Amino acid sequence: MASTADWRETYRERLRSVDEAMALIREGDLVGMGVLTPGQLTSALAGRAEQLGSLHVRALAPAEPRLFSPGQNGEREIELFIGDPLRAAHDAHVATYLPNTFMLGMKAFDAGREEARLPDVQITSCSEPNEAGYVQFGPHLWTRKAYAKRCRTVIGMIDPNLAPAYGDTWLHVSRFDALIEGAIAPVDLEAVAQRVETLSAEGDRAELRELLSLASPDQVALLEQVFHALPPKIVRQALGLSVVDAAAQAIADNLAPLIRDGDTIQVGVGTPSSLMFKAGAFDHAHHLGVHTELGSPGLAQLWERGVIDNSRKTLHRDRCVAAAWTGCDGADLRIIRDNPAFEVYDPDYLLNPALMSRNRQMTSVNSAVAVDLLGQIASEDRFGGHMINGTGGQPDTHISAALCPDGRAVTVLRSTALEGSLSKIVAQHEAGTLVTIPRYLADTIVTEHGVARLLDKNHRQRAAELISVAHPDFRADLRRQAAELWGELGA
């Protein structure tokens, strides 16, 4: 174990300016970056890419359009989450999608497989070192540490806005090849408020003022320079403040009876699943535990009220655990900040079904874009292969709940899209549709019209169950199509 003096000397030796750190990236390298990489770091990488001419980039939920603009030399990979900022780049074939999963993301490298393609360089934000010489990655851990432990070169940028978090989120400074100080300043909330008052569109000003009061400082830091210029709708989404609409409320009301006292729950990103805490789907239960990929608005507030106490969990008892607390709103993040009841862990460990399925009454709740009458769940695309997002952790968490002996894998979705003109329960998916969950792993489907139980049902029985939760306007046509495909469904 290095002494205090040793690590301080190591830290000083590895301090670099932004340009010096970027010089460690070589032409042809594959550079990885995770969710919520600070703009200062992604801008520096974009500048280095332009200098080198050829650079490959792998990004988890990227938000830097400059790195994914046409004419770039080198592959641009989007891992697990596409998201709104880079959907256009994917549609234009500037970027390609890496169909990875959290549970298998590090397998090829760890197993020594010749096809392993780990990034050569990982860039990440991190905290200042503690008295033992360890930095941490904060509440939005994701794959930051998992990659940093494995990549050839690791570049860290000290972020004073990084909220402290508990769990397996620490890494010694000796693992970094370069550390950058001073590039990120502490968030200036007063300056953000002043820009809202003087530079925002007058019609947006009152709502932006309200949103700023609801956000946590680390949330504001990510939007600091553009907060005043963004439409309130976009800010609201970024802060996890989406409104519970009538359909989402009805879905929550149908989900509630499925939640048992003592369940260990996972709730996924996207809507309507991310609205389930705010809509009260779990309010009636007692002694819930949390073992999840990420957070949703209202999760920590439910812990504060005592509904979630983690007292009956099999794993990580008395703790809420996640790969990241991304997705929580400002009130949640203020509760989570420096709170030992909330921990983060590498997703290849935490979301591995071999572990997660051991939880007592593991219950997953994830969203879908469409479900066909056999129970094939599509959560990534619409209109036959047009990707709107990736898998995220849905395969990992759904499989975990499906494998748990007393678990339940729930999929929630609104029954229609496009203002009611399109059914999301379909007889067959369009050609080219990406099936996220195959029919033999389908379990329970919930819409605003009811609950379809698919486990242990044959094709005709599944079709009947799903038609019963489709929008009434589409049921007759779905029943006719089902009869043509699989025979009459019966009464």
Image (cartoon, helix red, strand yellow):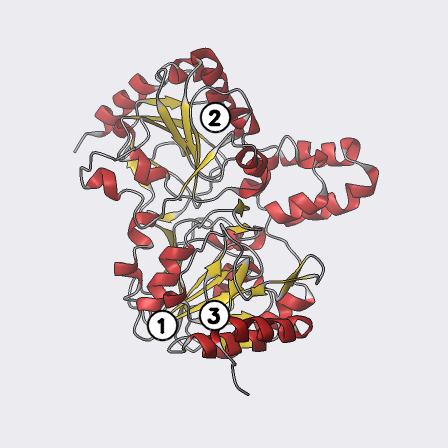
Which quadrant is the N terminus positioned in?
top left
Q: Find disc 3 in the rendering and name its residue.
A: 306
Which quadrant is the C terminus positioned in?
bottom right
Q: Residue furthest top?
A: 51
Q: Which residue is located at x 58 percent, y 75 percent? A: 479
Question: Quarter-wise, where is residue 273 in the image?
Answer: bottom right
Marks 2/1: CA–CA distance? 41 Å
**Residue at disc 2, secondary structure:** helix
Q: Position of residue 456 (x, y in %)?
A: 37, 78
- For label 3, the crowd category at 10 Å Cα-Cα, with few meaning under 14, some 14 to 19 and many 20 or more, is some
Residue type at mark 2: give it: Leu
**Residue at disc 1, secondary structure:** loop
Q: Earlier in the sequence, mark 3 or mark 1?
A: 3
Q: Which residue is located at x 47 percent, y 61 percent? A: 377
Q: Earlier in the sequence, mark 3 or mark 2?
A: 2
Marks 3/1: CA–CA distance? 22 Å
Q: Earlier in the sequence, mark 2 or mark 1?
A: 2
Whether tag 3 and tag 1 are in contact, CB under 8 A, the answer is no
- For label 1, the crowd category at 10 Å Cα-Cα, with few meaning under 14, some 14 to 19 and many 20 or more, is many
Q: Find disc 2 in the rendering and name its residue.
A: 41
Q: Nearer the viewer, mark 2 or mark 1?
A: 1
Q: Nearer the viewer, residue 122 or 297?
A: 122
- The reply to whether residue 254 is visible in this rendering is no
Q: Find disc 1 in the rendering and name its residue.
A: 407
Residue type at mark 1: give it: Gly
Q: Which residue is located at x 50 percent, y 42 percent? A: 82
114 versus 142 height, above or below:
above
Q: Position of residue 454 (x, y in %)?
A: 44, 75
Q: Residue furthest bottom?
A: 491
Residue type at mark 3: give it: Gly
